Image (cartoon, rainbow, N blue to C red):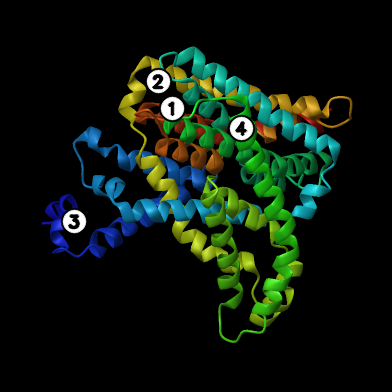
Amino acid sequence: MLLTFLQAPAAVSHGDGLAPVVLALAVILAVAKLGGDAAERIGQPAVLGELVVGVLVGNLTLLGVDWFQFITTNATIGVLAQLGAVILLFEVGLESTVRDMMRVGLRSLMVAALGVVAPWALGWWVGALLLPDHSVYVHAFLGAVLTATSVGITARVLKDLGHAQSPEARIIMGAAVIDDVLGLVVLAAVAAVIAAADSGAGLSYASLALVFGKALVFLVGALSLGVLLSPRLFSFASRLRGRGVLLATALVFCFTLAWLASAIGLAPIVGAYAAGLILEDLHYRELAAKEEKQLEDLIRPISSFLVPVFFVLMGMRVDLSALVRPEILGLAAALTVAAIIGKQACALGALGSPLDWLSIGIGMIPRGEVGLIFANIGLTLVVRGEHIIDAATYSAVVIMVMLTTMITPPALKWSLSKRRLR
């Protein structure tokens, strides 16, 4: 009976479209928390455990168990995962502010710029070398995926080791903010050029410059106008009665910018990240005091629900059987090496100073959730019938994300301890 229930959730639901969704959510949240706990016990971030357990559950078909395949094909779960990505980027943006970005200094700017240009070039080169039969758009997108940085993992390690206030930590955190902005601009530009190519438009320097300009104008405009309008929005909201006004107002702001980004041809996550950057404690201090809650605390329960859906689903879409093919395993290895070397170029921005350049380079390595979001967008892009990221390439990218996320904590601990011994 149980086997029949798992194999045919749609039939059990008697036509009710909600039943398979709630069953899928029950499975996802259960395995996500088990995977997160296992990861934390071995000193890895919980998100890595959520991703790995998703890979394992999604590949149970290799053992003849297909109970959970309905999850990957359920449209509602797919939408919830995309919403989880939006909330995740909003949270990432909340960890910094526009003011933080403006005062990071020239050295952080150099570190960030090098950390985007070098991985993009290396990723493009790896794609051209190992996937010669694919279009230049595939190669460019692989480069864009490598520009991502998940500094949250590095921040946790630095805090655990008591280095959160060190000069290297300030450079890494400052550079990461700019790195995320530049990476999102690159992603937006590449995705827009791919969409134009699919509609028959040719690739030209003018069209590429136009797309870059549009992405930059949106981000600069959103950040500039948002800083002016956000305090007024929350000042008005503070006069409203009832519970949950702060959370609702923040989500309205986030979703509106995500929609605006989508409306001009950019990924919704670009708008969500911009919304997080714009919001500062000063903007909603009165409303937070009234509700006796901080915005980050209010967002966390929503994030705890939706973000694991994103990570587990992304893991379930990995086809481990593809890694048996030498060319795909080679692509995963080459992308990982390119991802590591590319971020070491960040260290060049610290040369000529007493800073620990090796720790700075290592701190920028993990791709984490941002790299997964980039790869997921690639799954939706098509040029003349060719998927930019097919199932096999996606699997290689996810392996790269997992490896860069796993090696960063021990590598950073080694690098910082090595410096202490000098």
Q: Residue furthest bottom?
A: 241
Mark 2 lies on a secondary structure that is helix
Residue found at x 36% / y 51%: 78
User: In 3D space, how far apart are the residues under numbered discs 4 and 2 (Cα atoms)?
Assistant: 21 Å
Question: What is the quadrant of residue 213 in the picture?
Answer: top right
Residue of label 4: 147
Residue 174's disc is none
Q: Nearer the viewer, mark 1 or mark 4?
A: 4
- Whether residue 315 sits left or right of residue 339 in the image: it is left
Res 73 visible: yes
The correct choice, above or below, for 194 with respect to 228 in the image is above
Compare marks 3 and 4 and give the one earlier in the sequence: 3
Q: Are marks 2 and 1 in contact (CB under 8 Å)?
A: yes
Q: Amino acid at mark 2?
A: Ile
Q: Quadrant of the N terminus?
A: bottom left
Judged by depth in the image, the label closer to the viewer, 4 or 2, is 4
Element assignment for label 3: helix
Residue at mark 3 to residue at mark 2: CA–CA distance? 34 Å
Q: Which mark is residue 396?
A: 1
Label 2 – label 1 distance at C-alpha: 6 Å
Residue 324 relative to residue 134: left or right: left
Q: Position of residue 302 (x, y in %)?
A: 50, 64
Q: Which residue is mark 2?
A: 328
For the C terminus, the quadrant is top right
Q: Secondary structure at mark 4?
A: loop
Q: Name the N-terminal-most of marks 1 and 4.
A: 4
Q: Amino acid at mark 4?
A: Thr
Please give the residue where the numbered disc 3 appears in the rendered image.
Answer: 9
Badge 1 element? helix
